[in-house]
Amino acid sequence: MATTFQESTENQSWLKCRLDKGMFTDERAVTYPPEGAIQKSVFVPATVVEMLGDHNGRVRVRIVVRDGRTFAVLPSANRDIVSVIRDQDVSNE
C-alpha cells in the first residue's frame, strides 16, 4: 500500500519528471531527471503528481537551496532528495 503524504503546501513547487504506473493503483513511479544516465526513481502517492503527456508529468516537491544549489525533496516514504539539474524543471504553478 502506498504511503500517505500529508504536508503543508507552503513552500512547495512542481518538479518536471517521468511518470509511470506504481505497484499499486494509488501510487506512481517518479523518475528525475526524466532522461539521462543518472536518475532517481521512487514511488509516490498518485495524489501528488500531474500527468502532462505520455510519461511526462510533474510531482509536488519541497525546494531547498543550500550553498547555491537547488534540491527537491520528493514526497516518497523516505523523503528522497534529488539535485535539480535545470532551473526550468521547477515551477510554482
Image (tube, rainbow, N blue to C red):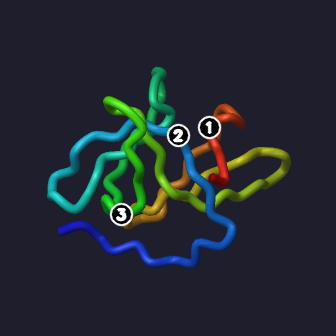
Q: CA distance from mark 1 to mark 2?
A: 5 Å
Which residue appears at 64% of the width and 44% of the height? 90
- Residue 47's disc is 3
Q: Kindly identify the amino acid type of the residue bearing the numbered disc 3.
A: Thr
Instruction: Look at 51% across and 77% down and name the residue there.
Output: 7
Q: CA distance from mark 2 to mark 3?
A: 15 Å
Looking at the image, residue 8 lies above or below residue 64: below
Residue at image coords 41%, 50%: 50
Q: Amino acid at mark 1?
A: Asp
Q: Earlier in the sequence, mark 1 or mark 2?
A: 2
Q: Is residue 90 above or below residue 72?
A: above
Badge 2 amino acid: Lys
Q: Residues within 10 Å of mark 1 (few under 14, many from 20)?
A: some
Marks 2/3 in contact by CB < 8 Å: the verdict is no
Q: Is the residue marked by circle 2 packed among few (<14), some (14-19), or many (20+) residues within 10 Å?
A: many
- Between 58 and 23, the one lying in front of the other is 58
Whether residue 60 sits left or right of residue 69 in the image: it is: left
Ranked by sequence position, the earlier of labels 1 and 3 is 3
The reply to whether discs 1 and 2 touch (Cβ–Cβ < 8 Å) is: yes
Residue 66 is left or right of residue 45, and the answer is right
Position above or below: 74 against 55: below
Residue 23 drawn at (x, y percent): 16, 52
Q: Which residue is tagged 2?
A: 16
Q: Which residue is mark 1?
A: 89
Relative side of 74 to 70, left or right = left
- Is residue 16 shown left or right of residue 77? right
Query: Going from the N terminus, do you reach mark 2 or mark 3 first?
Result: 2
